[in-house]
Image (cartoon, grey):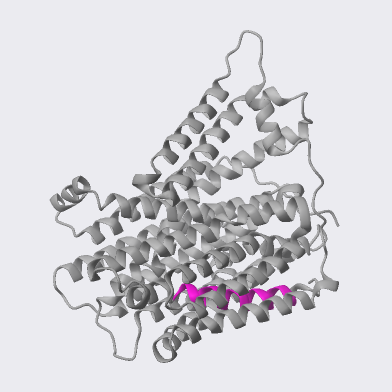
Amino acid sequence: MPRQIPYIIANEGCERFSFYGMRNILTPFLISTLLLFLPQPDRAGEAKHVFHTFVIGVYFFPLLGGWIADRLFGKYNTIFWLSLVYVAGHACLAIFENNLQGFYFGLFLIALGSGGIKPLVASFVGDQFDQSNRNRAKVVFDAFYWIINFGSFFASLLMPIFLRDYGAAVAFGIPGLLMAIATLVFWMGNKQYVHVPPAPANPHSVLRVARSALLARQPGQSRPGLTVAAMGAAGALASLAMTPQWGFVISACLALVLVLAFGGLGTAMQLERARGAHPDETIEGVRAVLRILVVFSLVTPFWSLFDQKASTWIVQANDMTKPDWFLPAQMQALNPLLVMLLIPFNNFALFPLLRRLGWEPTTLRRMTGGIAFTSLAWVVIGAIQLQMDGGTPTSIAWQILPYTLLTFGEVLVSTSGLEFAYSQAPASMKGTIMSLWCLAVTVGSLWVLIVNAGVKNDAITAMIATTGLSTIAFQMFFFAAFALVAAILFGWYARSYRMTNHYRPA
């Protein structure tokens, strides 16, 4: 095991405490304090909008961080300097607790700092391994995810209490202090790390190969791929034109999705035309990236469901019966606690049992099952909502079952996804591919914003009313069906996916 790993693990534990400490009290703080200028019925909806907009930012900025690390400053320098931006963002939350603009600026800095380093820390872990010890990488990725949830557990348990008893300045200030400690610990291990230098300008990058493929002419043949890519660009412009109606976040994110989806499909249709202008191995590398993006796109519904435990599920918990001393946001501590229990249970009990029964739990099989379990969790949370809508007082303890199902799905998808993203990414694109993995979370929250905006439409509200369900219950069952369809498609695509190995040579 590389000796420098403990520095990265300790850094991640503190950083995750800081992130989840502020994130898990964000929705209740917005509802109870910062959004008091809104009518009471509108506060929960606006808090969910702000929360998922913040999540979109957190998982969009990995694109920037990955590019800076891969092309300019390397992973270590990018992580260190963006960590300082991250600390400044926490300071703004603590200082501007009663100032809407100042508080939102702090959220922007945290999104930039946290998002910018997010793909790089996991990728930096992978850089510490080579072919001689890559079999230990899975253990470290699991430990990496375990320490994330160790920090998240105590943050979820304690920060709601600090918010209630000591106010927002203390509750948001403590995570800032932990982030400062995380940055210091990371700096202390500098001389022991393996530093993979940023890649030089690549004349055969993915974008340049895609451009060559789309623009290449062949005698007597049309360019259908270019037509498809142009359709995506036109759709993106149309989406941006809808900014006044949809808001900038939805319009811009949907435009990005259209460009990636149609541009990727168009490139795949004409990729062979780039041969000759680019080496064969580069062509095959781009083909691999396009296949990875299909996997990532099919994971986006999972993130739609998972991240709503800190928004929709808290809103539901506010209306449930509970002891006076228990705060709804503390329910989220159950998620990291279960993760810490389920990771060793899976590795030492469940997976060995499945292997003895002749069924190998491969990375993609685990991810397929994880998406399906997440769908089941939302069926259960929807059934609980139906009971509440019927006027039956419902204990918050009923949320334990959907939390358990959701967390089991998370362990299968998220830990496996980290390993998949790193192992499948060519060496020159580690940071970028990990960024695109994070972008899947942005797209997941985009679906949430679109659905939330949709249920405000009178026609859709009238349609929901004909089902006999409340709006929130309808949304819950809609998301459950969304994830189930994604699980079926993911499992079908995974059957033909060929795994590769892109760990560096020993």
In this rendered view, identify the residue nearer to me: 195 or 401: 195
Residue 232 higher or lower than 131, as above or below: above
Asked whether residue 9 is drawn in magenta, I would say yes
Asked whether residue 267 is drawn in magenta, I would say no
- State whether the magenta stretch is mostly helix, strand or loop: helix
Q: Is residue 207 left or right of residue 481?
A: right
Q: Is residue 330 left or right of residue 323?
A: right
Residue 429 drawn at (x, y percent): 71, 48
In this rendered view, identify the residue nearer to me: 27 or 494: 27
In this rendered view, identify the residue nearer to me: 229 or 284: 229
Which quadrant would the N terminus be assigned to in this image? bottom right
Q: Is residue 417 left or right of residue 247?
A: right
Residue 432 drawn at (x, y percent): 67, 50
Residue 18 drawn at (x, y percent): 56, 77
Residue 222 higher or lower than 482, as above or below: above
Q: Is residue 49 visible?
A: yes
The residue sitting at 76% across, 65% down in the picture is 76
Q: Is residue 344 visible?
A: no
Residue 96 higher or lower than 385, as above or below: below
Count up the numbered dots.
Answer: 0
Q: Is residue 261 left or right of residue 390?
A: right
Residue 314 drawn at (x, y percent): 34, 72
Residue 31 image-quadrant placement = bottom left
The residue sitting at 59% across, 50% down in the picture is 436
Query: Which stretch did the figure color magenta?
Result: 6-24
Which quadrant would the C terminus be assigned to in this image? bottom right
